[in-house]
Image: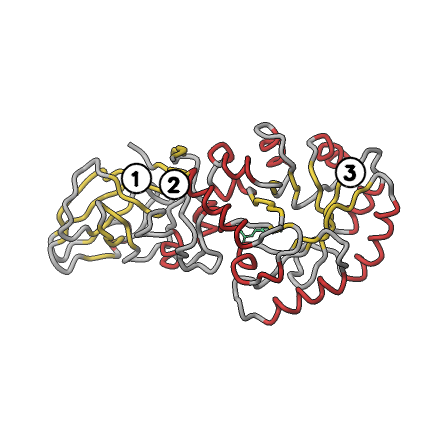
Amino acid sequence: MRAKALISQSALTHNLSIVKKLTPGAKVVSMIKANAYGHHLDCIHPLINNSDMLAVSELSEAIKLRAITDRPILLLSGIFSEDELQQAIDLGCHIVVHHTSQIAIVNNTQQMVNIWLKIDTGMHRLGLSANDYKECLPLLKDNPLVEVACIMSHFACADEIEHPMNEAQLNDFQTLTTQTDVRSMANSAAILSQAETTFDFVRPGIMLYGASPFNTPSDQLKPVMKLSAPIVSIKTLQAGESVGYGATWIANIDTTIAIVGIGYGDGYPRHAKNGTPVLINGVLCSLVGRVSMDLICVDIGTTKVNVGDNAILWGDDKLRVETVATYSGTISYELLTGVSSRVEFVQHA
Ligand SMILES: *Cc1c(COP(=O)(O)O)cnc(C)c1O
C-alpha cells in the first residue's frame, strides 16, 4: 500500500485543446520542464505527441526527452560552453540565448544552430537588455550558421491581471520587435487573460496540467494528477488527547482519526495547516496535527471509513491542488513538482 499519482491522459488532451482554442493560429510550445511539472515524462504522451514543440530547462532534461521523442525541443536556459552547444545541436534542440556570454559561444558555431533570442522586458531574471538586443541581433542574423527562429520574452506579473507591468512589458516587446519577427511571450496566465500576447508561439505550462496560474480552481481546466494514499489506521481520540508530533492538535470532543500513508517524504506539504481538506470516500475531511514524513492524520467526523480505503490529497473536482496550495502557503506549481520518487506514477484514461 503506497501513495499513487494517477495521470489522466484525457485531461492532458482536454487542457491542450483549451490552449489551442484560446490561441487560434499560434503554435504551442508545451512546458515540460521539471519532469513535466512533476507529472513524469513517460506519463504525458498526449502533450508530447500533440504539441508543436516541447520546452525543458536544462540539457539533462533534453537528453531524457530526446530518448522518448523526435519532436522539436526548446532549451530554456541555453548553453554555457562549446561542449554544451555541441550536445544541444546533436540533440536537435532550439537554444534560448539570454545572455551576451552565450552569443559569443553560439556565434562560433561550426554547424547550423537554431536559437530563440530572449529579451528582458521587465522580469529582470533572464534576457538581453534592450541595448544588448539591438547590438547583438545583427551579429547573429549575419551569421549564416545561426538561425534566429524566434524572439521571446517572459512576463513577471501575468498572474496579476491588472498589474501595470503587463502592459509595459508587452509595449516594450512590440517596440523592440517587428511584425515580420517570429515572436513568443505568453505563459498560461497570459493565455487565459491577455489574448493580445498570443503572437506566433505560446508557452503554456501549469494550465496543461489542469491547475490555474491564478491559484483558484478553474472550471475550464481538468486536473491531470490525482494524488491518493491508503488509510493505514483508524483510531478514536478521547476529548483532550492530541495527535502527531508536537501534540499541536488536541481533540475537544471524542474524534475519529484516519491515519493516511502519505507525508512530506512523498511531497505532501509539511506546511499544510490544520483544516486542509482531504477527500475520503467522497467527503471533504480535515487534516489535523503536523504532517510527518510518512503519515498525515485526518479528522473523519462521521464518515464511514475502513483501513485500506483511499484518501485523495488533490486532483479531484471536489479537491483541487490550488486549494491545498492555499492552505499550505504556496502555489500549485510547487506541490505538483514536489511529488517525490516514492510515489507510484500510473497513466490513467
Ligand atoms: C515555465 C515557463 C513558462 C510557463 O509558465 P506557466 O506559468 O507554467 O504557464 C513559460 N515561459 C517560460 C520561459 C518558462 O520558463
Relative vertical location of residue 8 with respect to residue 166 in this rendering, above or below: above
Q: CA distance from mark 2 to mark 3?
A: 40 Å
Q: CA distance from mark 1 to mark 3?
A: 47 Å
Q: Residues within 10 Å of mark 3 (few under 14, many from 20)?
A: many
Q: Nearer the viewer, mark 2 or mark 3?
A: 3
How many numbered marks, from 0 up?
Answer: 3
Res 66 quadrant in image: top right
Locate residue 182 relative to residue 264 in the image: left or right. right
Q: Position of residue 220 (x, y in %)?
A: 42, 54
**Does the beta carbon at disc 3 come under 8 Å from ligand 1?**
no
Sequence order check, earlier mark of 2 and 3: 3
Query: Residue drawn 67% across and 56% down?
Result: 153
Q: Position of residue 143 (x, y in %)?
A: 87, 43
Amino acid type, label 1: Ala
Relative vertical location of residue 24 with respect to residue 52 in this rendering, above or below: below
The residue at which mark 2 appears reads as 266
As drawn, the label of residue 113 is: 3
- Element marked by disc 1: strand
